[in-house]
Amino acid sequence: MSRSKHKVLVFGNPMVECDSMPLRLIGKLRKRFPRLEFKEFDPSENLESEGRLLNIIDAVEGIKKVVLITDIDRVKISRIYSMHDFDLGYSLKLLKKLGYLDGVKIFCVPMRISENEALAQLSALIRLALP
């Protein structure tokens, strides 16, 4: 009996240095965790089509180490003035409210951290959270 692969959606903007760390780590994460599927994901895509239980890696401002969030209510959202302000947090809260989302694991990577430190911390959390 083979286990199905966990899918991990990886967010980030390759054009913005501080927001690109998760994307820069994909190759190394794929080598460390061959049983996981790491998928680059554009926030403009349909998040609801990725399933009812989501695993996400994203860059986050204002944190000093990689952390795991499993409670969507802990995700802060900003006021929305335009479609540009419609972020991941808002999308997740909306999907939960509409009944499209049962759970989420968000691996939050600091925007200002070395690649080696981010990889080490993220790998440790992935081992614990996605056995």
Image (spheres, grey):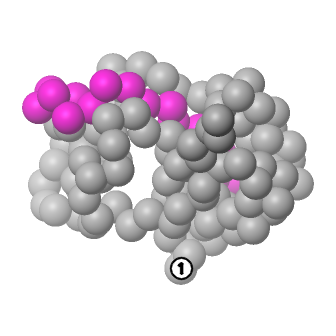
Which residues make up the magenta segment?
96-114
Residue 11 image offset from top left, x and y in percent: 49, 58
Residue 60 image offset from top left, x and y in percent: 54, 45
Question: Residue at coordinates 71% horizontally, 48% vertically from top-left?
Answer: 35
Which residue does the numbered mark 1 point to in the structure image? 15
Query: In which quadrant of the rendered view does residue 22 lie?
Result: bottom right
Quadrant showing the C terminus: top right
Task: Report whether 121 appears left or right of 23.
Answer: right
Quadrant showing the N terminus: top right
Task: Report whether 67 appears left or right of 59.
Answer: right
Asked if one can make out residue 102 in the rendered structure from this viewpoint, the answer is yes
Task: Report whether 12 appears left or right of 116.
Answer: left
Residue 118 image offset from top left, x and y in percent: 78, 48
- Element class at badge 1: loop
User: In terms of depth relative to the viewer, which is nearer, 50 or 112?
Assistant: 50
Residue 116 image offset from top left, x and y in percent: 88, 54
Question: Residue at coordinates 77% horizontally, 32% vertically from top-left?
Answer: 127
Q: What amino acid is found at the position of numbered circle 1 in the picture?
A: Met
